[in-house]
């Protein structure tokens, strides 16, 4: 099953300094796709951003598409994450943070929230460069809760966030286990997923597809999340 979610049909919000498209409702706590709770496509105006605010019990992955994000948090972490790179914040028992665009041009990000396996634990933050050249023609794991993905940023969920850049005509395959919830967004360009066409910033909710073939119909970049079912669903099944 592949459900195409066109960018033009996504929920949106406009706060002036922040223009956002929401692949899932930001206000509905039952929304999401398995453990994938939020996928926002954000545009942050120059010299603006998210003032300090709290989070808890969430894995927050920021994929910078254009521009850069400057981070600061209550653990005294600070850093600047450039286009193509990734930062991860494990909110754990609680953390306050701010995210600003200190650049002279708008910054574009994917903000991805994944429900952790367990609540609590010490909060943490980290960032890492992932040069697009290293992802040319192949999938690279950017963030992961699996120990085997040693080069990825760690998250506290049995999930993976992957990225790739493809030239027109190139393809990559991805295999997933039964019961997994996959979500793919084309960051740039035009591609197909098992024959379903996605334009730039379109999404695809995928389930019960053991193998994906992702083909570039023009030069493209995409991000893929492979997540388990949410904790609430798992608990209901076990009851």
Image: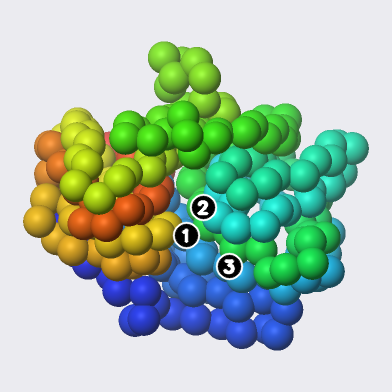
Up-down relation of residue 8 to residue 125 (above or below):
below
Contact check, label 1 and label 3, Cβ < 8 Å: no
First reached walking from the N terminus: tag 2 or tag 3: 3
Query: What label sits on residue 39 in the rendered view?
Result: 1
Query: What label sits on residue 42 in the rendered view?
Result: 3
Q: Is residue 170 left or right of residue 69?
A: left
Name which residue lies at 49% across and 45% down: 115
What percent of the width, then of the height, locates residue 206? 22, 52
**Mark 1 closeness class: few <14, some 14–19, many ≥20 residues within 10 Å:** many
Q: Is residue 92 visible?
A: no
**Mark 3 closeness class: few <14, some 14–19, many ≥20 residues within 10 Å:** many
First reached walking from the N terminus: tag 1 or tag 2: 1
Name which residue lies at 67% across and 57% down: 67
Please name the residue that numbered disc 2 is placed on. Answer: 112
Foreground pick, 79 / 59: 79
Name which residue lies at 89% across and 37% down: 76
Contact check, label 2 and label 3, Cβ < 8 Å: no
Labels 1, 3: front one: 3
What percent of the width, then of the height, locates residue 106? 68, 69
Name which residue lies at 22% across and 42% down: 170
Residue extending furthest right?
76
């Amino acid at each position: 099953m592949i459900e195409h979610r066109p960018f033009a049909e996504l929920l949106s919000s406009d706060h002036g300094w922040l223009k956002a498209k929401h692949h899932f409702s930001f206000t509905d706590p039952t929304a999401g796709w398995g453990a994938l709770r939020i996928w926002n496509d954000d545009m942050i105006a120059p010299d603006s951003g998210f003032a300090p605010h709290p989070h808890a019990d969430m894995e927050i992955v920021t994929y910078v598409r254009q521009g850069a994000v400057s981070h600061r948090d209550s653990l005294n972490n600070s850093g600047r994450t450039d286009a193509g790179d990734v930062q991860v914040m494990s909110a754990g028992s609680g953390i306050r943070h701010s995210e600003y665009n200190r650049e002279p041009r708008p910054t574009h990000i994917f903000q991805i929230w994944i429900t952790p396996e367990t609540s609590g634990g010490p909060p943490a933050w980290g960032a890492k460069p992932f040069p697009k050249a290293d992802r040319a023609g192949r999938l690279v794991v950017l963030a992961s809760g699996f120990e085997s993905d040693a080069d990825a940023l760690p998250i506290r969920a049995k999930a993976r966030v992957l990225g790739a850049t493809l030239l027109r005509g190139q393809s990559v395959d991805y295999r997933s286990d039964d019961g997994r919830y996959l979500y793919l967004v084309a960051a740039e360009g035009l591609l197909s997923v098992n024959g379903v066409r996605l334009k730039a910033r379109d999404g695809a909710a995928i389930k019960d597809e053991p193998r994906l073939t992702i083909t570039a119909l023009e030069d493209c970049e995409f991000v893929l999340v492979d997540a388990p079912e949410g904790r609430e669903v798992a608990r209901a099944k076990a009851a």
